[in-house]
Image (cartoon, grey):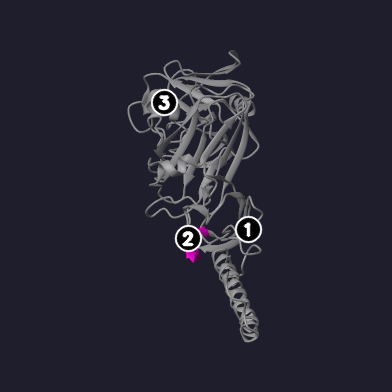
C-alpha cells in the first residue's frame, strides 16, 4: 500500500491535472480539424466548395467531359464521367436546339450521347448522381470550315408513283459514306424491304437512293429522318450542320408501257389498260434513238422550249413543246408532237423522245403521276437508262443494288 501523500504532494497533483486534460482535449480538436479538411478537399466540385457534413468523407460529385474549351472537336459523341458513385441523370443541351439523348454505362459512372456534337455549337452539361449531388460543365465546338448540304426527292407531303425512290444528292463529295448512311433512317407504314445504294448523279455529284426491292405498294407511307447534324462527310466534303426530314405517300398503281418496236404506249392502272395509243419514239441507229429499260417520270413540266443543242444534236430543232413529261436528265421526254403525226404507230422518227398526238399527250399528262414507271422495251434503242440518268435504279438487279450500300 503506497504511503499517504503529504500536503505539498497533493497540491502538486491537483495543479498538474488540468494541464494534462488540456493537452488531450487539444489533440482531439486537431484530429477533427484534419479529418474535416481531408473530407472537404476530396468532395470539392468545380467551385471548390466542400460537399457533405461532419467528419465523414462525402461522395465526389465532380464530372469530367471529353469535350471542353471553346474550340472542341465536333463529330464525336459527348462522354460524361462521374468521379465517384453513380449517375442518375445527364442533360447535354445545345443553345437553340434539342438536348442530346444518350445512355449510361453498366457501372453507372459514364454517360455517352447517341449522336455526335455538331460543329459551331455551344453545349451545357448538367449531371445528377444517385445521392442527390450534381455538377455542371460546358463547351463550344469549332465551326465547320466547309458545310455540306443536300437536295431531297420527292418533296415533303407529296403523293408519288410506285417507282419513285428516295433520292439524296449532295453538294460536296461524301467519302465517309458509312457514317452518312447510318444517319439516314427510313421507316415505312408496312415494313417494306429496301436498301440504300450509292451512285454518281448525272450532274457528277455524289448521290444515294433508297429503293424497295419491288415497286411500292399503293398507299405506303414513307418517312426519312436524316440525322446528319454533326456528321463529317470526309475530305473535301465538309460537315453537315442540320438534320433533314421528308414524308411522302404512294398513290395508285400505274405503269406506262412503251413498245418501241410496235410504236405503242399503254397506261395500265391496277393491271387494267386505261390508255393504248400510237407513238413515234427516237430514230434508231444513233444518238437520236430512245433509251430502253425502266425510266421514272421525274416531272410534269408542261409547255417548255426544247432546243437540240442542249442535248448535243446541233441546231436540229428549237420548238415549244406541250404536255412535256421528263423521263431522264439527258433530255428524254414523253410529250405532244403533232408535227410528227405521219409516223405515229408506224415508225420511230423523233430525236429521242416518245411523241404522240396533242389529245393523247393531254390525256396521259392528266393521268400520269410523278414516280410512275415507264417500262420501255424494243430493239430500236441506244442502250439502257443509267442509274444516275434520272431514276434508273430499277435497271439494276436487287442483289446488285444491295451491294451498293456502304453498310453492306
Q: Earlier in the sequence, mark 1 or mark 3?
A: 1
Task: Tell me, for residue 395, which label it has, or none.
Answer: 3
- Residue 314 seen in the current view: yes
Rendered location of residue 29, percent (x, y): 61, 73
Q: Secondary structure at mark 3?
A: helix
Characterize the local packing of mark 2: few (<14), some (14-19) or many (20 or more) Cα atoms within 10 angstroms. some
Q: Which span of residues is magenta-colored?
A: 64-73
- Residue 308 seen in the current view: no
Quadrant into which the C terminus falls: top left
Q: Residue furthest bottom?
A: 8
- As for residue 224 lying within the magenta part, the answer is no
Q: Are marks 2 and 1 in contact (CB under 8 Å)?
A: no
Characterize the local packing of mark 1: few (<14), some (14-19) or many (20 or more) Cα atoms within 10 angstroms. many
Quadrant into which the N terminus falls: bottom right
Q: Earlier in the sequence, mark 2 or mark 3?
A: 2
Q: Secondary structure at mark 2?
A: loop
Q: Is residue 203 above or below residue 12?
A: above
Rendered location of residue 255, percent (x, y): 55, 21
At x 66%, y 63%, the residue is 53
Mostly what secondary structure, the magenta segment? strand
Task: Tell me, for residue 379, which label it has, or none.
Answer: none
- Foreground residue among 304 and 198: 198
At x 46%, y 44%, the residue is 180
Q: CA distance from mark 2 to mark 1?
A: 32 Å
Badge nearest the viewer, 2 or 3: 2
Q: CA distance from mark 2 to mark 3?
A: 38 Å
Q: Which residue is mark 1?
A: 134
Task: Tell me, for residue 144, which label it has, or none.
Answer: 2
Badge nearest the viewer, 1 or 3: 1
Residue 136, image quadrant? bottom right
- Foreground residue among 9 and 264: 9
Amino acid at each position: 500500500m503506497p504511503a499517504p501523500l503529504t500536503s505539498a504532494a497533493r497540491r502538486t497533483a491537483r495543479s498538474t491535472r488540468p494541464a494534462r486534460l488540456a493537452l488531450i482535449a487539444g489533440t482531439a480538436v486537431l484530429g477533427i480539424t484534419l479529418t474535416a479538411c481531408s473530407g472537404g478537399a476530396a468532395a470539392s466540385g468545380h467551385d471548390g466548395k466542400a460537399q457533405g457534413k461532419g467528419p465523414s468523407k462525402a461522395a465526389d460529385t465532380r464530372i469530367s467531359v471529353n469535350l471542353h474549351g471553346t474550340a472542341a472537336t465536333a463529330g464525336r459523341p459527348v462522354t460524361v464521367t462521374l468521379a465517384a458513385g453513380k449517375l442518375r441523370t445527364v442533360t447535354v443541351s445545345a443553345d437553340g436546339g434539342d438536348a442530346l439523348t444518350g445512355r449510361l454505362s453498366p457501372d453507372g459512372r459514364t454517360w455517352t450521347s447517341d449522336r455526335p456534337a455538331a460543329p459551331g455549337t455551344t453545349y451545357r452539361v448538367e449531371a445528377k448522381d444517385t445521392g442527390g449531388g450534381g455538377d455542371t460543365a460546358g463547351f463550344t465546338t469549332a465551326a465547320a470550315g466547309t458545310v455540306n448540304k443536300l437536295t431531297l426527292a420527292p418533296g415533303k407531303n407529296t403523293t408519288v408513283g410506285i417507282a419513285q425512290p428516295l433520292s439524296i444528292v449532295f453538294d460536296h463529295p461524301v467519302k465517309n459514306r458509312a457514317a452518312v448512311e447510318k444517319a439516314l433512317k427510313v421507316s415505312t407504314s408496312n415494313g417494306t424491304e429496301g436498301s440504300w445504294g450509292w451512285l454518281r448523279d448525272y450532274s457528277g455529284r455524289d448521290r444515294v437512293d433508297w429503293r424497295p426491292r419491288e415497286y411500292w405498294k399503293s398507299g405506303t407511307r414513307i418517312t426519312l429522318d436524316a440525322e446528319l447534324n454533326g456528321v463529317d462527310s470526309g475530305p473535301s466534303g465538309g460537315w453537315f450542320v442540320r438534320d433533314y426530314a421528308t414524308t411522302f405517300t404512294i398513290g395508285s398503281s400505274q405503269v406506262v408501257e412503251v413498245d418501241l418496236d410496235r410504236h405503242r404506249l399503254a397506261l395500265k392502272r391496277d393491271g387494267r389498260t386505261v390508255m393504248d395509243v400510237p407513238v413515234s419514239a427516237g430514230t434508231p441507229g444513233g444518238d437520236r434513238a430512245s433509251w430502253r429499260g425502266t425510266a421514272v417520270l421525274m416531272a410534269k413540266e408542261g409547255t417548255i422550249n426544247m432546243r437540240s443543242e442542249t442535248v448535243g444534236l446541233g441546231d436540229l430543232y428549237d420548238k415549244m413543246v406541250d404536255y412535256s413529261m421528263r423521263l431522264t436528265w439527258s433530255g428524254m421526254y414523253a410529250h405532244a408532237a403533232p408535227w410528227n403525226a405521219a409516223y405515229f404507230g408506224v415508225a420511230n422518227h423523233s430525236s429521242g423522245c416518245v411523241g404522240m398526238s396533242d389529245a393523247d399527250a393531254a390525256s396521259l399528262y392528266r393521268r400520269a403521276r410523278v414516280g410512275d414507271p415507264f417500262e420501255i422495251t424494243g430493239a430500236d434503242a441506244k442502250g439502257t437508262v443509267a442509274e444516275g440518268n434520272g431514276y434508273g435504279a430499277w435497271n439494276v438487279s436487287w442483289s446488285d443494288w444491295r451491294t451498293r450500300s456502304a453498310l453492306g
